[in-house]
């Protein structure tokens, strides 16, 4: 595959760790940005973290999903010389992205004012839980905290149960996506004007951007948590004869009437139930019909009958089944790579989105870097440092 050119020439200094930031940096590196991880000489949180009994394949898989396509340089940002080196790198960069605790970069003397003084064209993206303004701007946050505070956790689960955290780390991933959207918009503006700017990427902002419809449904006769019973459509999970789960939806009047014919409730068609009646007032009755019908079919039979009348339906894919899901494989959403240490390694996050003209790629020649692997190379290439100068800085604990 030809090397991606979409973001070729864009230099990103990546100070991120854990999940949201590395995920954002991966989206940029997959499409050709030169992403340089700036790490402490002793390694950051995830470099030092070790799970007892963790197979090497798990560590490798995480590396290929979250640290691929980039280089690593160590710089001690606590050291005055390290700060000087970082600011010199900023002068050569287009983007700085970080997700330290709120205020950390300012305390280091490396906040936005210092960065834009060094490089007025720099795009600076601090990724935080709550953004850089408002009464919660200094509050510490992780994915679970933002899921709870955004309202999403209160909406997830069943009415008679507690709030439930959705399975994936959606605050981290959603925050990462919105940060990249902001960075790309800022890069487009910089291309036209030469001006940089700050991209204020809060995870709460990202999740609350998703909840407008649900907030609007607050006046409906529904519990705070309504499980699979979405108040704007028929949508639930039903057990089939072969003990699988069937999920289907009807959202239009035409789909509703088609469903009634399929499950043998033709007589209801003449009553012209509106969406409030079928989705909320008489929902229990409707779902009892659906469950009774599903129990007479295997999953395969139900899916075929619904496909024949064009009702959207599917089974529930488990995590294990994702690895063999035909559409997931066809779209290369999970891929297999050749790792030089462990060989064939599957379950690696693929490239999204799909660009036909400038497709992203996983450069298997660029193995997820070891700590500081490219320090000398980067300082020589970007700042003109000699090997001797870099070696002396290493001795001093600066890099």
Image: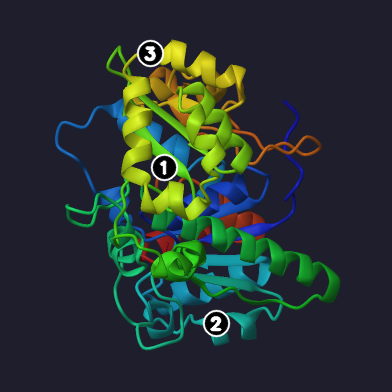
Q: Secondary structure at mark 3?
A: loop
Q: Mark 1 and mark 3: span between their CA atoms?
A: 53 Å
Closer-to-camera residue (151/67): 151
Residue 370, disc: 1
Q: Could you say whether the residue bearing mark 1 is in a helix, strand or loop?
A: loop
Whether residue 131 is situated above or below residue 151 in the rendered picture: below
Q: Of all residues shown, which one is farthest toward the right? A: 192
Closer to the chain start, of discs 2 and 1, is 2
Residue plotted at (68% across, 37% down): 354
Q: Quadrant where the N terminus lies?
A: top right
User: Which mark, residue 297?
Assistant: 3
Looking at the image, tell me whether mark 2 or mark 3 is earlier in sequence order.
Answer: 2
Question: In the image, which is nearer the foreground, mark 2 or mark 3?
Answer: 3
The one nearer the camera, 77 or 356, is: 356
**In the image, residue 362 lies at what x, y percent?**
59, 33
Residue 231 percent across, percent down from the top left: 43, 53
On the picture, is 142 further left or further right than 82? left
- Residue shown at the point (37%, 21%) measured from the top left: 293
**For the point 54% across and 53% down, which residue is it?**
25
Q: Earlier in the sequence, mark 1 or mark 3?
A: 3
Quick one: SS at disc 2?
helix
User: In the displayed structure, does residue 190 sit left or right of residue 265?
Assistant: right
Evaluate whether residue 383 shows in this view.
Answer: no
- Disc 2 versus disc 1: distance between alpha carbons? 29 Å
Q: Which residue is mark 2?
A: 112
Q: Dot 2, how many residues are within 10 Å of its Cα: few (below 14), some (14-19), or many (20+)?
A: some
């Amino acid at each position: 595959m030809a090397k991606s050119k979409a973001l070729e020439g864009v230099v990103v200094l990546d100070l991120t760790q854990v999940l949201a930031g590395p995920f954002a940096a991966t989206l940029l590196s997959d499409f050709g940005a030169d992403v340089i991880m700036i790490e402490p000489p002793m390694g950051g949180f995830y470099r030092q973290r070790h799970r007892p009994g963790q197979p090497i394949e798990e560590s490798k898989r995480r590396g290929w999903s979250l640290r691929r396509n980039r280089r690593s340089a160590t710089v001690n940002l606590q050291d005055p010389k390290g700060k000087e080196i970082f600011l010199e790198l900023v002068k050569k960069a287009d983007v700085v992205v970080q997700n330290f605790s709120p205020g950390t970069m300012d305390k280091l003397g490396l906040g936005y004012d210092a960065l834009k003084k060094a490089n007025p064209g720099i795009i600076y993206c601090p990724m935080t839980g709550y953004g850089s303004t408002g009464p919660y701007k200094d509050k510490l946050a992780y994915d679970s905290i933002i899921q709870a505070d955004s309202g999403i956790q209160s909406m997830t689960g069943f009415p008679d149960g507690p709030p439930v955290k959705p399975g994936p780390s959606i605050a981290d991933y959603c925050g990462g996506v919105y940060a990249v959207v902001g960075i790309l918009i800022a890069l487009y503006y910089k291309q036209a004007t030469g001006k940089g700017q700050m991209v204020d990427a809060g995870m709460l902002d990202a999740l609350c951007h998703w909840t407008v419809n649900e907030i609007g449904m607050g006046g409906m006769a529904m519990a705070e948590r309504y499980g699979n019973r979405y108040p704007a459509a028929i949508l639930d999970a039903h057990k089939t004869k072969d003990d699988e789960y069937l999920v289907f939806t009807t959202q239009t009047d035409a789909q509703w009437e088609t469903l009634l014919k399929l499950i043998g409730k033709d007589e209801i068609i003449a009553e012209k139930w509106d969406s409030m009646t079928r989705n909320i007032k008489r929902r229990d009755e409707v779902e009892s019909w659906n469950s009774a019908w599903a129990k007479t079919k295997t999953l395969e039979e139900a899916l075929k009958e619904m496909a024949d009348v064009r009702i959207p339906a599917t089974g529930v894919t488990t995590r294990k089944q994702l690895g063999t899901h035909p559409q997931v494989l066809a779209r290369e959403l999970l891929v297999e790579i050749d790792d030089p240490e462990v060989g064939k390694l599957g379950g690696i996050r693929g490239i999204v989105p799909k660009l036909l003209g400038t497709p992203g790629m996983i450069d298997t020649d660029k193995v997820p870097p070891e700590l500081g692997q490219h320090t000398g190379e980067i300082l020589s290439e970007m700042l003109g440092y000699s090997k001797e100068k870099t070696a002396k800085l290493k001795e001093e604990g600066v890099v």
